[in-house]
Amino acid sequence: EDRIQLLNKVGFEWRQSQAPWNKRYEELLSFVQEFGHARVQRRFPKNPSLGEWVHNQRRKHKNNLKDDASSKIKKDQIELLNKVGFEWGRCRKPWENIYEELVRFVNKFGHARVPQNFL
């Protein structure tokens, strides 16, 4: 008990910081603003850490749905992700969505020669 008081005295934070999660969420918001959707590839070349983070959020959510105690995703985090149109399942994009992305690319660059590594 004395140790707890000593730690409290120096301002020890008992709750895990939300800063890393919030940083990635801000990166996701930037991604949504740039690309118009929240479907970040797991191996997103421009920001590999964001792609891995998105993958981990899906995995944590899936575990949460199974009432897995190891899931560390919080209800407020799920709500924030839902607000930006986060897709919880890895799904193939419908042809129409890919076509819309191509139209946006053509409007931006003036041609339809999309580089293979372009996202």
Image: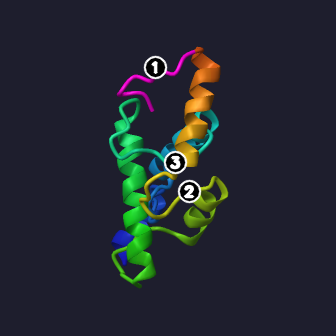
Q: Which residue is mark 2?
A: 86
The magenta span reads 111-119
Q: Mark 3 or mark 1, which has the lower sequence index? A: 3
Is residue 71 found left or right of 87 in the rendered image? left
Q: Nearer the viewer, mark 2 or mark 1?
A: 1
Say which amino acid is labelled 3: Trp
Q: Nearer the viewer, residue 25 or 20?
A: 25
SS at badge 3: helix
Residue 109, position in %: x, y? Answer: 57, 16
Q: Nearer the viewer, mark 3 or mark 2?
A: 3
How packed is label 3: few (under 14 Cα within 10 Å), some, or many (20 or more)? few
SS at badge 1: loop
Q: Which residue is mark 1?
A: 113
C-beta proximity under 8 Å, tags 3 and 1? no
Residue 97, position in %: x, y? Answer: 57, 46
**Distance between the Cα atoms at labels 3 and 1?**
18 Å
SS at badge 2: loop
Say which amino acid is labelled 2: Phe
Say which amino acid is labelled 1: Arg
Residue 90, position in %: x, y? Answer: 41, 59
Give the residue displayed 50% in from the left and 48% down from the top.
39
Q: Nearer the viewer, residue 65 or 37?
A: 37
Q: Residue furthest bottom?
A: 67
Q: Which residue is mark 3?
A: 95
